[in-house]
Amino acid sequence: MNVIRTIHEMRSASRAARVAGKCLGLVPTMGALHEGHLSLVRAAKEQCDAVAVSIFVNPLQFGPKEDFAKYPRTFERDCELLEKEAVDFLFAPAAEEMFPPRAVTYVTVEGLSEKLCGRSRPGHFRGVTTVVSKLFHIVEPDAAFFGQKDAAQATIIRRMVRDLNFPVEIVVGPIVREPDGLAMSSRNAYLGPQQRRAALVLFRALTEVRNRFDQGERNAGKLIAAGKQEFRTEPAVRLDYLEIVDPETLEPRLSVSDRSLIAVAGFVGSTRLIDNITLPG
Ligand code: PAF
């Protein structure tokens, strides 16, 4: 695996791959890799001739009081995992490489960026779309792979790619869960044993919504109420939101008659976790 630190070198490597007729896949990450990331790497390996993974803990997508400083950084282990997956390029730039001094240019997907996590994390999605556009310009991939766990992120990136004519296919891989249902996340590393148990309430709430849906309930208000009820059984977790939305517009739905995204976010102590399901599944 070629570990690349500079934009110039990454561009040369990806251009050489494409001149050689290879289709190039990119898996953008912030490191602290888990099976969710590795499933995206495997999907990229299957679909593309060469695969680049980026590891960059993007300061733009963290709020001033968020966990940028303590975000898990496990570079050596990440490298070992990616070597095992036979990744071709690992792009791991320093912040000074990614952002020129006095950079003031951002990419914003208006409207969508204020929905779901965007409401409780102002500026988060602007940070994501700015850095993802930069990665697309630097790596120039044919396809880029994102996880469904960050469902709103995937919707917003798809819209950005459409609106700005990026020649990139966006592939979204399914959520990978621990055996007990907890969605895999780099932030799960913050949880102590009791918090780890309490965190399961997110998946329980989604499962309750799915059960009520399977029993015939279609009214979004009633489904949300059933999901929220689960949080009352788990005082260690503070619900941020539980919403039922159109997966493309992220607008709330009144009824779950068409495909809908059921998205939840909650704080376990100071750790913010998210999860979602799509109905009909
Ligand atoms: O999903 C993530 O890990 C990040 O939001 C991403 C897409 C790598 C951008 O920093």
Image: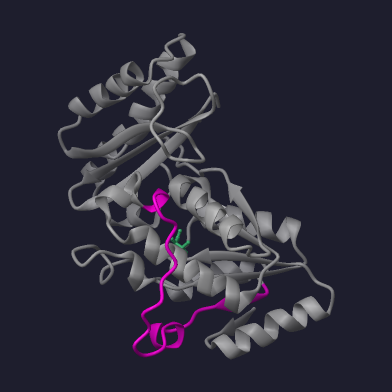
Does 203 sit left or right of 136 as displayed? left
Residue 180 picture quarter: top left
Residue 166 picture quarter: bottom right
Tell me what residue is drawn at x 50 percent, y 67 percent: 132
Tell me what residue is drawn at x 26 percent, y 26 percent: 228
Quadrant (top left/top right/bottom left/bottom right) for the C terminus: top right
Residue 34 in percent (x, y) is at 48, 57
106 part of magenta stretch: yes
Residue 130 in percent (x, y) is at 44, 69
Which of these two is toward me, 141 or 272? 141
Helix, strand or loop for the magenta stretch, by majority: loop
Colour logic: one colour
Tell me what residue is drawn at x 45 percent, y 87 percent: 97
Q: Residue furthest left?
A: 235
212 part of magenta stretch: no
Residue 40 picture quarter: bottom right
Residue 216 in percent (x, y) is at 46, 9
Quadrant (top left/top right/bottom left/bottom right) for the N terminus: bottom right
| Residues rendered magenta in the picture | 88-113
Residue 94 in percent (x, y) is at 42, 84
**In the rendered image of this protein, does residue 87 appear above or below residue 178?**
below
Which of these two is toward me, 110 or 45? 110
**In the rendered image of this protein, does residue 221 appear above or below residue 30?**
above
> Can residue 94 be seen?
yes
Does 167 sit left or right of 62 as displayed? right
> Can residue 191 be seen?
no
Which of these two is toward me, 99 or 70? 99
Tell me what residue is drawn at x 63 percent, y 62 percent: 165
Q: Residue furthest top?
A: 216
Question: Ligand 1 falls in which quarter?
Answer: bottom left
Q: How many marks?
A: 0
